[in-house]
Image (cartoon, rainbow, N blue to C red):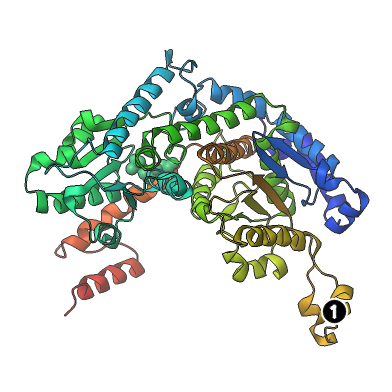
Amino acid sequence: MSLKQPTQLPEWRALEEHFSSIRDQHLRNLFAEDARRGKNFVLEAEGLYFDYSKNRLTGDTINLLLALAEASGVKERTEAMFSGEKINSTEKRAVLHIALRAPRDAQIMVDGQNVVPEVHAVLDKMAAFSNRVISGEWKGYTGKRIRNVINIGIGGSDLGPVMAYEALRYYTHRDITCRFVSNVDGTDFVEATRGLDPEETLFIISSKTFTTIETMTNARSARDWSLKTLKDDKAVAKHFVAVSTNAAEVTKFGIDTANMFEFWDWVGGRYSYDSAIGLSLMIAIGPDHFREMLAGFHAMDEHFRAAPLERNLPALLALIGIWYNNFFGAQTVAILPYDHYLGRLPSYLQQLDMESNGKHVDLDGNTVNYQTGPIIWGQPGTNGQHAYYQLIHQGTKLIPCDFIGFNQTLNPLGRHHDLLMANFFAQTEALAFGKTAEEVKADGVEDSLVPHRVFEGNRPTNTILADRLTPETLGKLIALYEHKVFVQGTIWKINSFDQWGVELGKVLANRIIPELESPESPELTHDSSTNALIERYRQRRNPR
Ligand code: G6Q
């Protein structure tokens, strides 16, 4: 790969020049100049209505950004990804989460082999298993039906399943409870299993590598917890299944590979919840809804691959992000879903984006001299309005926001949905247009308070509206953000698909574990702070 870094492209310099003419423009003027702005700066694709008019940009900005995308090879690299090239160069792997939702008759080759039949074989195996659990045909060791499903996994093997389970809760069978254990803090396991009957509890051990210390520690505690009641090793076969790429480790743990659901090294952890990693979700919502979700993903994949850049939803979302990140110098992006079911979406997107694009060297290993991935954060509205929105409205930082909402609610209840959406629209309006000193004075506010009550406005937002939160819509939304991250990574010329920073975490603690567990271990040789902390912990960890 020897494409230029983006800052060396003439298209980048053109954007820098253009930026100086835009930076002081106010959204109030941009809207005043173009009465149709709210309709012109809109793109509708695959049932998602994307209004980007409340952004600090003009038609020229978009054209310059599109030229940057073109010069950065976004289209070519998209084809490379879709056709199974090993674009994850540091791990020498293809990047094919798009194959997880390809229809049965598609052909996607990796190393000369079509992977789509394997994908569907695993989906069919998951569906057969899920149906047995849902119907009660799959029984626990003592013959009781399964009422609790606990997914044990962390990072990409947890955040996706838990986000989607919460998002699609409306569609779940209410007679099976799903819980998710991720943290190595024993509290997570103890609280998740409190009050549950081991005879009715199925554990899904989800780990691509099956060596992650948190997951394996929780898995061993789960086995102890089950066997304390069930008292026979044979019970493991009825109460434990595995999702992994590592059959050898699964067998070593004592799970029969007949009860293992496979996925592949060309699926990154944070891109995996639509693989077998979503088994808990499939049990919760049923195979049909799971397949509807995959169809949603696939529809957005097709849109992304086929649509020209100027009508390409993930590309536009990505380019607008680059505009703020690299030209306005914004450090963060807030994800603000106005739907309670999407409560876990911000943390899911936080991993997707920050683990993918939190990189400081380019594909050739050169340090970058420009900003890469932003900090992603957020919570569902309206709750955030009563907390941190203050800083978005009146603080000193520029925080572009993605507002996500639905025209129809799944839970009609009096005026609730109208009130929710009134808040959604009012917030994006207030952020864009603010309130001038004259307007504040006209409200009769005393002079000394006027500066405090002024809202500058010019705070940019994207609005993403869909009709209804369905499994299909969720698939589209997630694929939208996956491809947004891909486009940005391509323009920044970084590898969005490795995660050496996360790998580091997996080994760091290993040196200290024996120092905590066997106090007679050799002299501590860390820095003076770490040594003192370890010593203090050793002295005081047992309550007197
Ligand atoms: C995701 C990351 C990371 C990973 C977890 C769990 O892209 O690589 O979050 O998913 O560390 O790894 P295992 O699935 O191997 O346990």
Q: From what the image shows, is residue 333 above or below residue 143? A: below
**Would residue 458 be visible to someone looking at this image?**
yes
**Would residue 220 be visible to someone looking at this image?**
no
All told, the count of numbered labels is 1
Question: Can you give x and y, in whole percent of width and height, for residue 467 in the image?
Answer: 63, 43
Q: Nearer the viewer, residue 358 or 465?
A: 465
191 displayed left or right of 29? left
- Disc 1 marks a residue whose amino acid type is Asp
Q: Who's the residue at 64% across and 66% down the image?
A: 389
Q: From what the image shows, is residue 400 above or below residue 160? A: below
Q: Who's the residue at 78% across and 59% down the image?
A: 432
Q: From what the image shows, is residue 90 above or below residue 353? A: above
Q: Nearer the viewer, residue 37 or 421?
A: 421
Q: Which residue extends farthest front? A: 414
Q: Who's the residue at 86% across and 56% down the image?
A: 25
Indicate which quadrant contains ligand 1.
Answer: top left
Question: Can you give x and y, in whole percent of width and height, for residue 79 in the image?
Answer: 60, 22
Q: Which residue is mark 1?
A: 443
Q: Who's the residue at 83% across and 83% down the image?
A: 445
507 displayed left or right of 543? right
